Image (cartoon, helix red, strand yellow):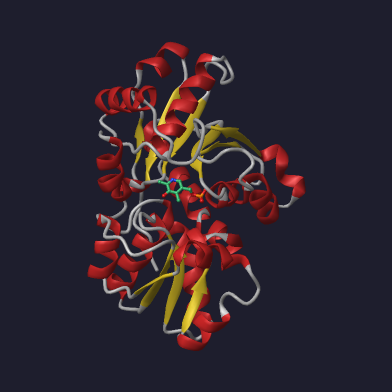
Amino acid sequence: MMLPQAPLQPLNLHWLAAAGIDVAILRLDLIDPVISGNKWFKLTHHLAAAKNAGAQGVISLGGAHSNHLHALAAAGKRFGFPTVGLLRGHPVQTPTVLDLEAFGMPLHWLGYAGYRARHEPGFWQPWRERYPQLYPIPEGGGGLDGALGCADIVSQAHAQLADLGWDDFDGWWLACGTGTTLAGLVLAEARQRKVYGAMAVPGDHGVAENVTDIVGPDASAGYELLDASRGGFAKIDAQLLDFIAMAENESGVPLEPLYTGKALLALRQAVEAGRISQGSRLIFVHTGGLQGLRSRCAMAGC
Ligand SMILES: *Cc1c(COP(=O)(O)O)cnc(C)c1O
């Protein structure tokens, strides 16, 4: 599957200019109107593995706002393979869920306890029996296959450096949920450039373990994880919303408060704390997620 090219653009923000730091933003949110963000990159190797296994389609899991299931269902509809979604909790009609149904993805609601059982050894057995022709993809499109698909993020950026007038750059900055995308960048960079991961979940949520599982313990010099969660996943506060509104207005780049907004605010804090040296060039990865904004925004009142 050919991935569309994500544009690499200058990110114009006064606090970056004031600190003498150049940031370009790689717009994964623009690769496609519906299959948006890092989730398409994370899916490519899983879909290839499904094909190699002789599967006709794929089955995966997520919540009622899941960017992963959204990208998966959209890809299934676009490329003509069946998808099935296993959903956390009880039936609810979010904009994401309505899209999943419109994309033709049958949904099974597992409840909360049923969803928590997803890591138990026997979890997939009944689903394999019910859908023997479908290949299971882990939550969020994670694992080594998920990370390997993200190597394309690195090559897409490198291919556009000259257009920016850059001969090279110093590092990457991106939002982390599971850390799979970060792991893919670390593998592709092979320690040539540092990868900063702004965690959208608190530090005890297993991100570091997930990254180590994928990249190995020796790669730890190639990346750094920071807690950007502001007290918890999907916790939204007024300072964050103000920051996002200002940054969107100044840069013209749309953000959402769960991942990209928190990651950019964490970058500002790192810049103000003097942690990024003057003259540095960074690439901020816009990981997408704007589809999830529709109902969250209604909930948060933004
Ligand atoms: C899923 C997601 C992430 C996190 O990706 P991981 O590979 O799980 O770290 C970041 N940003 C957005 C917008 C996402 O949808």
Q: Nearer the viewer, residue 196 or 110?
A: 110
Expressed as whole percent of the image width and height from the top left, the position of residue 105 reads: 32, 73
Is 185 placed above or below 273 here?
Answer: below
In the drawing, does residue 4 fall left or right of residue 281? left
Question: What residue sits 32% from the left and 23% below the top?
Answer: 242
Expressed as whole percent of the image width and height from the top left, the position of residue 126 reads: 53, 83
Question: What residue sits 34% from the left and 38% below the top?
Answer: 256
Is 211 placed above or below 89 here?
Answer: above
Tell me the quarter of the picture where residue 250 sits.
top left
Q: Is residue 146 visible?
A: yes
Question: What residue sits 48% from the left and 50% below the top?
Answer: 155
Tell me the quarter of the picture where residue 94 sits.
bottom left
Expressed as whole percent of the image width and height from the top left, the position of residue 61 reads: 46, 66
Q: Nearer the viewer, residue 250 or 238?
A: 238
Expressed as whole percent of the image width and height from the top left, the position of residue 248 reads: 28, 29
What is the tally of numbered marks visible in this picture? 0
In the drawing, does residue 160 fall left or right of residue 148? left
Tell me the quarter of the picture where residue 214 sits.
bottom right
User: Which quadrant does the C terminus fall into?
Assistant: top left
In the drawing, does residue 98 fall left or right of residue 276? left
Q: Nearer the viewer, residue 81 or 154?
A: 81
